[in-house]
Image (cartoon, rainbow, N blue to C red):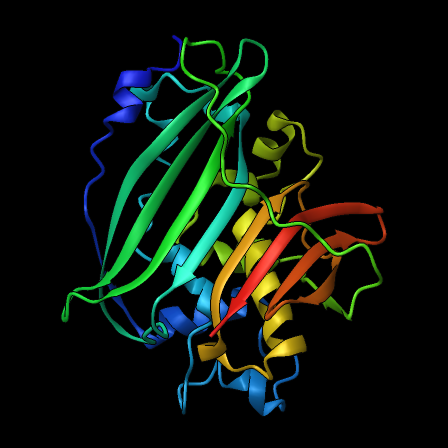
Amino acid sequence: MPLDFEALSNWDFEEIEQTLSERDTILYALGLGFGEDPTDRKELAYVYEDGLKAVPSMAVTMGYPGFWLRDPRTGVNWRKVLHGEQWLDIYKPLPVKGNIVGRSKIDFISDKGEGKGAVIYQSREIIDADTGEKLARVAMSAFCRGDGGFGGENLPGPTPAELPDRAPDYVCDIETLPRQALIYRLSGDYNPLHADPDVALSIGFDRPILHGLATYGLAARAILKSLLDYDASSLVGLDVRFSAPVYPGETVRFEIWEHGGEARFRASVPVREVVVLNNGAARFA
């Protein structure tokens, strides 16, 4: 069954209502390794209810519609889907608790051609259910490796951020735990690829991999630590391109450049000499 362009273009996402608790906010931060030094007051603010702050990247978990591409009506070969890019705009600091609504939609679909795949671009508005205020906009691309050549247009996506051609201004190493994915998945992404060794093997990995959005959250942690003195209100945008998976237990190295009032960054796993996040951009208030 080929990718169903009409069905995907008009996909009717249910509005997702979510009651966010302080426990959810703390659990998300723990899934990114915040509190590694439990005596560090600046990191403790993200994992302790007294003066609790939300990690800005938590917006990607809010109002999440689930891995809907597994629905057979899409015609997508979900086992060949890769998370391509992630974009985030934050309009106001995220609440640590409260009622929110997520409204998702398909923005467009690009046909790269038979044998080259297709790219689905989707976005989601995160709205404060009590006030109606927009909190954030989350957007992503899904690279469907087995679904090109359905007769659609080859539409370009957003231009990725360029990295400066010089040594980075900051280098930040973050160690992950062997059980990191098992903690992070409790924030709502229960894809068995990140927990079940047999599923990982069936897809071509020798063991479960870390969620791409967990690595994305590590980028937020590195930016907060290196440039913003852990001030969550200063980070208002975070964009990345995913290039390779991280295995739980690996150390991720972030190279960060100051760039015209923003930051640019990439991330790698030095032990494997592989870049895992590329063309990263962080925007500040």
Instruction: Find residue 126 and report its image quarter.
Output: bottom left
Q: Can residue 195 be seen in this view?
A: no
Residue occupying the point 56% across, 44% down: 194
| Residue at 23%, 26% in the rendered image | 10
214 vs 47: above or below: above
Q: Residue 195 at what x, y percent from top left?
A: 55, 45
Viewer can see residue 255: yes
The residue lying toward the viewer, choosing from 33 and 42, is 42
Query: Residue 66's spot in the image, x, y percent?
Result: 35, 42
Instruction: Provide residue 285's location: percent of width, then percent of height.
Output: 46, 75
Q: Position of residue 226 (x, y in %)?
A: 67, 76
Q: In this view, does 169 lie to the left or right of 106?
A: right
* In this view, 137 is above or below 28: above
Residue 42 position (above or below residue 235): below
- Going 32% across and 75% down the picture, which residue do you hit? 95
User: For the N terminus, which image quadrant?
Assistant: top left
Residue at the (68%, 59%) spot, across then down? 265
Relative depth, front residue between 191 and 232: 232
Q: How many labels does the image show?
A: 0
